[in-house]
Amino acid sequence: MKLNVLVTAGDGIGPEVTAEAVAVLKQIAQAGGHDFSFTEKRIGGIAIVNDGTPLPKDTLDAAVASDAVLLGAVGGNEFNSLAPDKRPEGGLLQIRAALGGFANLRPCFSFKELTVNSPLRPEIIEGTDIMFVRELLGGAYFGKPREWNKETGVGYNTMVYTKDEVTRVARVAFQLAQKRRKKLCSVDKANVLEVSQLWRAAVTEVAKDFPDVTLEHQYVDAMAMHIMNRPRDFDVVVTENLFGDILTDESGVITGSLGMLPSATIGGKVNLYEPVHGSAPDIAGKGIANPLGAILTGALILRHSAGLEKEAVLVETAVKKVLEDGFRTKDLARGNMDGLTVMSTTEMGAKVRELLAASF
Ligand code: IPM
Ligand code: MN
């Protein structure tokens, strides 16, 4: 198997955690005789500083020419006063748009060993396994018109969807549900927003092609509560861009740390892979960041871009085993410390690779 991966590590803890994901992918390639190559390019704040733009042309060209893009994180406090499209986050939105992936898969699961890290009670969260499908190219993030008019003191964005945009992401969600527990929950605000009424109607229409999947609709405000109260009831959840952004951060509370959560964006020219966590500037460069979200993102590359499902599962199993064996980065080390070993970012990466090597 040949795979050309563009690595855009970005800002803050991005480079540290991405390096561990790449090391795991190299190990998988070597063990299986696969030809994975990795090219590195700048994105985000580091690109603003070096190239004057958050998404330099050579990064974009390399991304479009690659088989998969692995992105670390973007953002930093020094850029907070810039306009949205000039900020590091602007580079991320531009690369998302250019690659064309519209279905952002964000799994949310509870690790038994980390239930102590969640403020929610173990009996609520244990066994949670939700696949969020966040629409990534529409809604208020990209809708026009948009403006902050300083003269009139008026600001607005436009939450806009076409029926086709809803239909294509709904199809991905239904297909995933068919392979899982055959339940799909679509989240909207159809009691207030016309765009959500269109969303609901389009999803309901797609449901006719998937009679084996049970579809329910929830309003986003109620859903924010349900995923805290009864997360196990949900299988696949599909929603628009901004609601998905908010609900997936919220669902990080179930896992106990956003640092554990991977994501894959599919459906476009080139798939884009990014951990859900941000650049965490407060802990950057200290060697303490948790690389497991990035490593699990690497597993998603194996699954969705390399077609190496077995190897993806091996990586996921190695991450579970690391936790079972009591190894934690600093952010994860909570509660009773008996039997826990606190490790640095690189030690954690090495531990995953050690367990992985034993499983080949
Ligand atoms: C995410 C992030 C991004 C988003 C930011 C950094 C632009 O919060 O991936 O969830 O809002 O999509
Ligand atoms: Mn977010």
Image (spheres, rainbow, N blue to C red):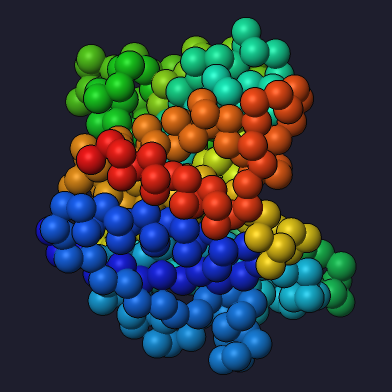
Quadrant of the image occupied by residue 59: bottom left
- Expressed as whole percent of the image width and height from the top left, the position of residue 183 reads 36, 17
Asked if one can make out residue 89 in the rendered structure from this viewpoint, the answer is no
Please identify the quadrant where the C terminus is shown. top left
Residue at x 44% of width, y 44% of height: 352
Q: Nearer the viewer, residue 358 or 211?
A: 358
Residue at x 20% of width, y 25% of height: 209
Please identify the quadrant where the N terminus is shown. bottom left
- Expressed as whole percent of the image width and height from the top left, the position of residue 349 reads 49, 52
Residue 198 sits above or below residue 81 on the image: above
Please identify the residue farthest to the bottom as the structure is shown.
Answer: 51
Residue 304 sits above or below residue 116 on the image: below
Across the whole image, how many numbered discs are drawn on residues? 0
Residue at x 86% of width, y 77% of height: 151
Quadrant of the image occupied by residue 248: top right
Please identify the residue farthest to the top as the structure is shown.
Answer: 123
Q: Is residue 100 left or right of residue 128?
A: left
Q: Nearer the viewer, residue 194 or 296?
A: 296
Residue 62 sits above or below residue 164 on the image: below
Residue 260 sits above or below residue 219 on the image: below
Q: Is residue 164 left or right of residue 87?
A: left
Asked if one can make out residue 98 in the rendered structure from this viewpoint, the answer is yes
Residue at x 37% of width, y 32% of height: 317
Q: Nearer the viewer, residue 208 or 73?
A: 73
- Expressed as whole percent of the image width and height from the top left, the position of residue 245 reads 59, 45
Q: Is residue 303 left or right of residue 112?
A: left
- Expressed as whole percent of the image width and height from the top left, the position of residue 255 reads 59, 30
